[in-house]
Amino acid sequence: MLMMDTRKNNNVGFSSSYDYSFKILLVGDSGVGKSSLLLSFISHQHPPQDLSPTVGVDFKIRMLTVGGKRLKLTIWDTAGQERFGALTSSYYRGAHGIILVYDVTRRETFTNLSETWAEDIKSYSTNPECIKMLVGNKVDRESERSVTREEGLAFAKEHNCLFLECSARTKKMCSWFLKISH
């Protein structure tokens, strides 16, 4: 189990309501379903189909108990549009986990992982122990798939990422945030 004590000796960032606090980022192109995945995980409900694109950065907090320890996950949902790149670069700093999301029905979102998002992580992530996870979203649209599971696995292996495919719409495999805490 990944357990990094993010409490400070001087109690900055410490609360008696949790034992550990983790900063997790969701990154990827606009429209891949980052916000839908986050809402599905946070609210335990199916996200609305007409979610507006994230402008800048948004975040949600989820409290969990894993192995008897109380975890506070602060999950940052970043805008996928390039114009917000300068804004989101500062959010990479200090992240404990980065989740790269692509849409299995839109090949360009997968291609942009290595051309844009993996490069941003190399440039801006300040935590050498940061856990990365690759998530292929929208597997409920199998007939429209343009990126194979094998391609996702190969990318994950090359970039030292955990990997899974899921659907925010059907909540298939949406317990994936828990993997980053284990």
Image (cartoon, grey):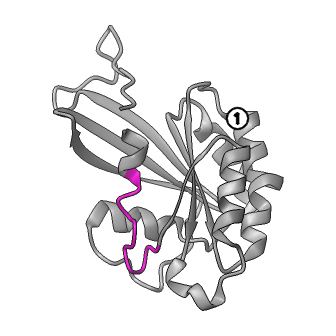
Relative horizontal placement of residue 129, taking residue 73 as reference (left or right): right
Q: Position of residue 169 (x, y in %)?
A: 42, 80
Q: Is 171 included in the stretch rendered in magenta?
A: yes
Q: Residue furthest front?
A: 150
Along the line of sight, the residue nearer the viewer: 79 or 37 = 37
Q: From what the image shows, is residue 109 above or below residue 117?
A: below
Instruction: Give the quarter of the image for residue 124.
Output: top right
Which image quadrant: the C terminus?
Answer: top left
Instruction: Give the quarter of the image for residue 111.
Output: bottom right
> What residue sits 48% from the left and 79% below the top?
51
- Secondary element under disc 1, as helix, strand or loop, is helix
Which image quadrant: the N terminus?
Answer: top left
Residue segment shown in magenta? 167-177
Relative horizontal placement of residue 39, taking residue 117 as reference (left or right): left
> What residue sits 55% from the left and 86% below the top?
141
Q: Residue furthest bottom?
A: 143
Q: Identity of the amino acid at label 1?
A: Tyr
Relative horizontal placement of residue 22, taking residue 82 as reference (left or right): left
> What residue sits 57% from the left and 72% below the top?
53
Along the line of sight, the residue nearer the viewer: 35 or 118 = 118
Along the line of sight, the residue nearer the viewer: 36 or 132 = 132
Q: Position of residue 84 (x, y in %)?
A: 70, 56
Q: Residues within 10 Å of mark 1 (few under 14, many from 20)?
A: some
Provide the residue designation for mark 1.
124
> What residue sits 38% from the left and 65% below the top?
174
